[in-house]
Amino acid sequence: MMRKTLVAAAAFAAFAAQAQTKWDMPTPYSDGEFHTRNVKSFTEDVKKATDGKVDIVVHANGSLIKHPDILRAVSSGQVNIAEFLLSQFGNEDPVFEADNIPFVAAGYDAAWKFYQAQKPLLEKKLQGRGLKLLYSVAWPGQGIYTKDALKTVADLKGTKFRTYSPLTARLAELLGANPTVVQVPDVPQMFATGGIQAMITSSATGTATKSWEYCKHYYNTSAFHPKNAVVVNARAFSRLPAEQQTAILRVASTAETRGWAMSKVRTLEANETLAKNGMTLHEPDAAMKSAFTKVGAQILDEWQKKAGAEGQTIIKTYRGK
């Protein structure tokens, strides 16, 4: 009788633990950013789809784990699910930074097509780190912010230029600027103290950091669409019952579709906000476009050499060759 009671208690404890799966989810961006809002909708949908058996608690704005440490944290199981900017970890694997190659896949349609070409290798690389890709969402196209208007691209020479990934740093170097890695929350302070004088980022980040308080000009280059990835620790995911896994994957697919749509809306809203707050929005002239394209071609060539056969596969698949 005692043995049956112990077995029953153990079974109940296991069931209760399963029924109360709770994951902490770090994300680098503020509560108001569209990526974070999409993540929170995703976690709410997960809770509904699993009848409350999987509860994911979002920790925004790098409050739980700082951005540079998120990949390691979710790979090691310190946390079981997370969101991060893929290109943040381009030094660890060139496949992670493929979407940072400038002027190769400009615009949302091209960015989506590029994602489909990158995705099989991206999933493989994440699997090698014990991770499963749930979904990925693009940022608005990246543009250049400056305090003073640019007569030519050469005006960027010598400026302290905010970057956030290896390829954006290389872009700054080829433009003659001095790359300086700065996380989003620190951007306003760095401009205020002269730590940076220009940057490349999206109109979304520009509005989130109130860029009009430290910049007056925005060049809408739409150079590339970097992506955030939402990943889950593969071991933790495998411990969930099959029906919960299926539910999470279904909800993730919905979050990806919703996130890309939100990104497009965010672009329009952010551009309007920049203009309403006194910033001048520029479309690069022919000379600027030519200079940017030349720099982009060099970065693509360097990246393909570094990425090897995998890089060739991504570009050939994207271009339909």
Image: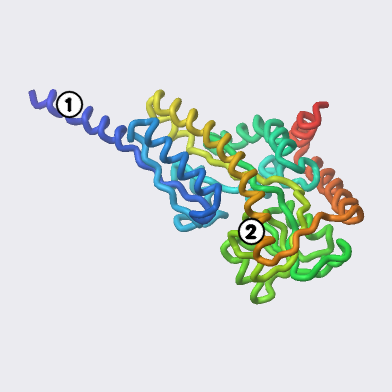
**Residue closest to the far left:** 1
Residue topped by disc 2: 273
Looking at the image, can residue 161 be seen? Answer: no
Q: Secondary structure at mark 2?
A: helix
Residue 230 figure quarter: top right
Instruction: Classify mark 1: residues with Cα within 10 Å, few (<14), some (14-19) or many (20+).
Output: few
Which of 257 and 225 lies nearest the eye of the viewer?
257
The earlier-in-sequence mark between 2 and 1 is: 1
Instruction: Name which residue lies at 31% across and 33% down.
Output: 18
| x and y, in percent, of residue 225 in the image | 70, 45
**Mark 2 vs 1: CB contact within 8 A:** no
* 158 versus 117 height, above or below: below
Residue topped by disc 1: 8
Residue 315 figure quarter: top right
- What is the three-letter code of the residue carrying label 1? Ala
Which of 34 and 24 lies nearest the eye of the viewer?
34
Instruction: Name which residue lies at 44% across and 52% down.
Output: 59
Q: CA distance from mark 2 to mark 1?
A: 61 Å
| x and y, in percent, of residue 159 in the image | 78, 69
Looking at the image, can residue 283 be seen? Answer: yes
Q: Depth-wise, is mark 2 or mark 1 nearer the camera?
A: 2
Q: Secondary structure at mark 1?
A: helix
- Residue 210 lies left or right of residue 225; in this view the side is left
